[in-house]
Amino acid sequence: MAADFVDGTAFNFEQGQRSRKLFAAVVLAALDDAIADDKKYGNGPEQIARWARSRDGREVLSCAGIDPNERVVSGLMEFVGNGVRTSVALSREESERRSQAEAA
């Protein structure tokens, strides 16, 4: 009986982790869309801020495990303003982290 509870809890945790990853992917897609808008129309930071402050945006951020506060909105706007696609930023960040780990 206790094993069933542990299995069920582990399954629910795993499902929650998958769900968070899915919503995080939606956030990354929204960032990429805002970066594309910024390059095309020059309004990317405003677009991501409008999305992040909307009901849907706040819900997606929350489901991704991100607190949808103004500090987060400012960070998203800054990220979009930098104009680096999420895939490039993530791979660069990952390679920097690996090189720091190797140096330590």
Image (cartoon, rainbow, N blue to C red):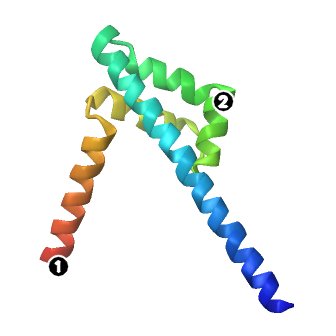
Q: Amino acid at mark 1?
A: Ala
In the rendered structure, the answer to whether residue 12 lies left or right of residue 43 reads right
Instruction: Specify the quadrant of the image occupied by residue 10.
Output: bottom right
Relative to 48, say whether 85 is above or below. Answer: below
In the rendering, at what x and y percent does residue 65 appear? 59, 52
Give the quadrant of the C terminus: bottom left
What's the residue at 42%, 32% (across, down)? 31
User: Disc 1 designates what residue?
Assistant: 104
Q: Secondary structure at mark 2?
A: helix
In the rendering, at what x and y percent does residue 36 appear? 33, 21
Q: Amino acid at mark 2?
A: Asp
In the rendering, at what x and y percent does residue 40 appear? 30, 11
In the rendered structure, the answer to whether residue 33 lies left or right of residue 99 reads right
Outermost residue, bottom direction? 2
Relative to 48, say whether 71 is above or below. Answer: below
What's the residue at 33%, 17% (across, down)? 38
Outermost residue, right direction? 1
Badge 1: residue crowd in 10 Å (few <14, some 14–19, many ≥20): few
Residue 95 in sight in this render: yes
State the mark number for residue 56.
2
Relative to 101, say whether 47 is above or below. Answer: above
